Amino acid sequence: MFKRVQLFLLIFCAPYLLRAQTTVANAENWMGFKRVFITIDNHKAYYVKPDNPLPGNPWVWRASFPDWHTQMDSLLLKRGFYVAYINADDQYGNPQAMQIWDKFYKYLTETVSLARQASLEGVSRGALYTMAWAKRNPDKVSCIYNETPVYDFKSWPGGKGKGPGDTAAWKQLKQVCNFTEQQAMDYRDNPIDHLEGLAGFKVPVLNVIGINDELAPRAENTDLFVQRYTTLGGPASIYPVTDGPQELRGHHFPIKHAGLYADFIFSNSYPVKKTLPYTDYFKIRTGLPHFFEAASNKRKVTVAFLGGSITYNPGWRGKTCAYLQECFPETEFHFIAAGIPSLGSLPHAFRLQRDVLDSGKIDLLFVEAAVNDRVNGTDSLTQVRDLEGIIRHTKQNNPLVDVVVMEFADPDKNKDYSKGILPVEIENHELVAGHYQLPSINLAKEVYDKLKNNEFSWADDFKDLHPAPFGQEIYFETIKSLLQACRENYALQTRSISPNLIIPKPLNKFSFNNGSYYPLTQAKRDSKWTYTENWSPQDHLGTRDGFVHVPVLSADQPGASLSLAFKGTAIGIAIVSGADAGMVTYSIDGGPSKTIDLYTQWSSFLHLPWYLLLDGSLANKGHILKLTIADSKNANSKGNACRIVTFFKND
């Protein structure tokens, strides 16, 4: 990555997709090279073969006007590059065009064995295609050459700025994008928008422009793009052409430095870098047949995301939602964002009912807990009971639900892998996923292997266990690859899916299959406890959504006591642990008294949601919990407080 940027600076600072329906036609000569014609889903396409291909088969992908200014392509063919083009014109880079591009890419990389990364060439409106595809696939692009680029369709064909626009093309754009006038004006995914991921991959972009282009004014297009892209850390350069004649109001000009531009593409695309495929890091197992059946045939589909802060934060989740909507534009999606920072598998198992299942029947669930289970110190047995409980509980709600189990990266897992150790959280996620034949993605192993393969740097690119935009793109691309593979698998099966309603026997008889919250009002308490209907902290420490402005049962005096009658195999308390968190002693059914410290390593600056499983192996009958605030406290704590947000139990 860094070599690519250095070369760039050196030169210029001195639907998701089923397998494509493909046909191959006869070849012909193009500029002295063999051109092979193919058809991808009724779209005409071709690729041109060099006489002596370079190792790794680097290639150039042209968008729109493939016979315009071909000098650079001819030079690259002579140097061993392939050249490719597919006709998806008059769609202005819309999602349907991008799906055709995806199919063409798949054909070229898998059938023709071209390099995994393409260099993109866009002329004029072709930049709407190159940038749309590059933003969706920054990992698959080595560099971009854009000539007289349109970077905002409101500028052209809209003509909403200084340029004249094109009335007929503007009408066509709104039609193929299914926009009203206002929707087109409000659209916020032009090439000038959402550049974080592309910039994270540091994809070099060379802009060759007319000095006085009136059709695509540079202030509304190239200058705006370069300003935004470079601000985000993306490498971009402008080469203004002053040579004449300048025609079509400055939009057409001669190319007199084709060798220089060819050097830009060559230097950023060769040698071809070998990257590890996403397919090495997921397991399809029985796939997602019921989800694809529902998305293909039903008008409404519900997809839920259950996880911690990596699910809560913007990034892969939003991209996955947008991708599913693009794949099934006729389907009405309901997305449930049930990510809460700091929470792992134990909270997930007991909040599943309220935060996910109470919203209705779920068709697809994404679940992750591997990072927070390590950070929170959740023991191995509890992890298995949690994860299995989530799966069984979800399938009790809808036996046809499909589930994707995900395992994200963190420095601790990198250390484990470096020592040849399989992280216990990964082992448990895979144990449960394998037992129930669920698709799973080991993103932790993928990140570690790609770091070892020198594809990127943790410090400079991935940056944190809460990934930078670069890392979010890695996550999304792998998730997208899994979805694509599962959809292909579904397409090869009979379209009439036979329901398999048999749930395997549990791995552990005490798994939390019916975890739920248990109301605070069920507790019998002494006068030292206070019930607050709308709690918020007075010390100005941080809070988490869902754990502030909620009912809380609290006490801060040693000796404050409560009791709770309940029925089930497990009982616990969910608290907010702040700077004054104390200790509690508790017993169940008059058994031995145990003491637990409520203060955490984060309590000095955050009222942390903290779930404490008091016992998970009880007989399935009635029990009595007794809990008392202890006299002792953590040396770092400022008090003896216990603030209970909810009890939780498993029936």
Image (tube, helix red, strand yellow):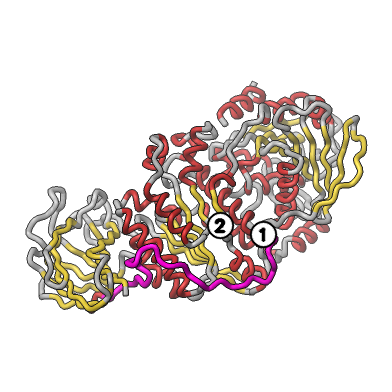
Secondary structure predominantly adopted by residues drawn in magenta? loop
Q: Which mark is residue 285?
A: 2
Q: In front: 235, or 561?
A: 561
420 lies left or right of 470: left
Residue 206 horizontal/vertical position (percent) = 68, 33
Give whichever of discs 2 and 1 has the lower sequence position. 1
299 lies left or right of 364: right
Q: Determine which residue is flagged by label 1.
A: 185
Amino acid marked by disc 1? Met
Report which quarter residue 230 is drawn in. top right
Residue 59 horizontal/vertical position (percent) = 74, 35
Can residue 255 be seen from the camera position used here?
no
- Please provide the residue range marked out in magenta: 492-519
Q: Is residue 512 magenta?
A: yes
Answer above or below: position of 451 versus 546: above
Q: Secondary structure at mark 2?
A: loop
Q: Nearer the viewer, mark 2 or mark 1?
A: 2
Q: Which mark is residue 67?
A: none
Q: Residues within 10 Å of mark 2 (few under 14, many from 20)?
A: some
Amino acid marked by disc 2? Arg
Answer above or below: position of 49 versus 286: above
Q: Quadrant of the C terminus?
A: bottom left
Q: Secondary structure at mark 1?
A: helix
518 lies left or right of 497: left
Q: Is residue 457 magenta?
A: no
405 lies left or right of 484: left
Q: Residue at x 87, y 38 (%)?
A: 35
Residue 302 horizontal/vertical position (percent) = 54, 70
